[in-house]
Image (cartoon, rainbow, N blue to C red):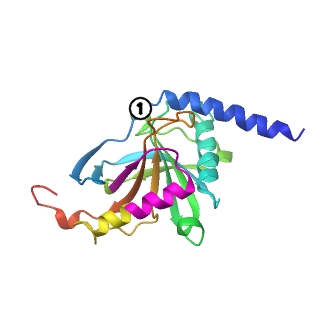
Amino acid sequence: MAKAPRLKITVINLLCLVVLCRATESPQYEVVHAESDFEIRHYRDATWMSATVNELSFQKATLFGFHRLFQFIQGANLNYSRVAMTAPVVTSLVPGAGPLHSSAYVVRFYLPAKFQDSPPTPLPELNLKPYAWDSHHVAVRKFSGFATYDIVVKQAANLATSLSLSPWANATSATHYTYSIAQYDPPFRFFGRTNEVWVDVDASRFAGKASF
């Protein structure tokens, strides 16, 4: 009997992987500044679906949060709507006392253009909320491989160092989150994986310049 829940989760994970392979749409942005090891992007206003997870483990939080989001896109909403998979899945760290100074995580799914203006209402038991991510700038560092806790810590530190040595040294924005990790690939893709670490930056002091 004890094996049944594990089997259920495994089957759900496999279904998630199949859906991830078909991911097409992504949030729109433009690169406004580029360095050798990071870039600054401007993202437009967009609506995401978010799952807050009170879990100290980054990997477990991403898994549990995406599990709830996966149920939503498979029709667990009041409209019984199927929602196409998008990329990336973004896990944001809420400041606190846990790993990476986080006490909770928010896992976000970008809603396709079809649902940007009118997202389906999630079933109440999923505890999901639409999130209006306003136009903003982020510093982005790309990295390959799997986004494990140790790698995330290292990549976040590398981005912080790069920013400190650039014109963006004092441009880090004060938000409700510290770093966000964007993952673009399903777990069974072992090569050519794309991940990113994001941190919000304030581009207002660069406004009006011909080039950042």
173 with respect to 19 (left or right): left
Q: Nearer the viewer, residue 47 or 156?
A: 156
Q: Position of residue 5 (x, y in %)?
A: 80, 40
Residue at 60 percent of width and 33 percent of height: 16
Q: Residue at x 63, y 35 (%)?
A: 76
Look at the image and tell me whether residue 202 can be seen. Answer: yes
Query: Which image quadrant is residue 137 in?
Result: bottom left
Frontmost residue, 175 versus 124: 175
Is-magenta flag for residue 144? yes
Whole-percent x and y of residue 4? 83, 36
On screen, residue 101 versus residue 1, left or right, reads: left
Q: Is any part of residue 77 visible from this angle?
A: no
Q: Residue 138 magenta-drawn?
A: no
Q: How many marks?
A: 1
> Which amino acid type corresponds to the residue marked 1 in the rendered image?
Lys
Seen as rendered, the residue at the extreme right is 1
The quadrant of the picture occupied by the N terminus is top right
**Residue at image coords 58%, 49%:** 62
For this orientation, the residue located farthest to the left is 210
SS of the residue under disc 1 = helix
Looking at the image, is 97 positioned above or below residue 32? below
Q: Position of residue 53 (x, y in %)?
A: 62, 56
Q: Residues within 10 Å of mark 1 (few under 14, many from 20)?
A: few
Query: Is 94 above or below relative to 37?
Result: below
- What residue range appears in magenta? 139-158
Quadrant (top left, top right, bottom left, bottom right) of the C terminus: bottom left
Residue 178 location (% of width, % of height): 45, 64
Q: Look at mark 1 in the image and give the residue it sits on.
A: 114
Residue at 24 percent across and 62 percent down: it is 203
Horizontally, residue 22 falls left or right of residue 134, namely right
